[in-house]
Image (spheres, rainbow, N blue to C red):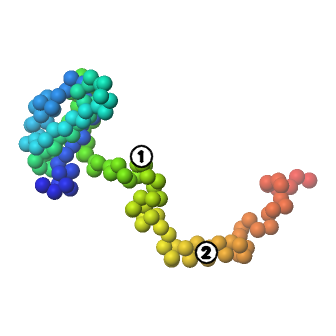
Amino acid sequence: MTDTSRLKSTVYVGGLENAVTAPILHAAFLPFGEIADISLPKPEAPSSTDLHRGFGYIEFELPEDAKEAIDNMDQSELYGRVIKVAAAKPQKDSTEGLGSKTAVWQQEGWLAKHAVSDEDRLAAEQARTTTEAGEDDPMQGLEGLDVAGPSAK
């Protein structure tokens, strides 16, 4: 299965009660189709006694099953809590974007995404010279006015 088809077949389940386990999620989501994998990320703190971080991912065999699960289970109740079920988003690369350990302008894709083309640079330069020359400036000649509106006599 390719990464894109795996992503389309995976749903995010948030707002889970601490007592919810992988077998419980399996039983709750099995009516919507064959489940390939269930992942409940563990807390990062080693001293934590929680089984998971309050969310998990369920990968179905077919993308249609994942959509069916989202349609039927979003905002439903599981173990006394309303759960959020949505399509899973791709995992962010820890070396890119906000939260990475390198500056955004040093990242490989940043410059290509935010670089200004020669055409845009030329258009900006023409706009700057037009405003410096004073052409078509509707505010020209209003510098001396200190009161707005008609003058009181």
The image quadrant where one finds the N terminus is bottom left
Where is residue 15? Give x, y as percent: 28, 31
Q: Amino acid at mark 1?
A: Gly
Q: Residue drawn at (86%, 55%), measured in percent from left and top?
A: 151
Give the spatial CA distance, label 1 vs label 2: 35 Å
Q: Is residue 11 visible?
A: yes
Q: Residue drawn at (20%, 56%), measured in percent from left and top?
A: 4
Q: Residue drawn at (42%, 48%), measured in percent from left and top?
A: 101
Where is residue 113? Give x, y as percent: 42, 64
Q: Residues within 10 Å of mark 2 (few under 14, many from 20)?
A: few
Which residue is at the front of the view, 48 or 35? Answer: 48
Q: In what element is the residue under mark 2? A: helix
Q: In what element is the residue under mark 1? A: loop
Where is residue 119? Give x, y as percent: 51, 77
Q: Amino acid at mark 2?
A: Glu
- Identify residue for label 1: 99
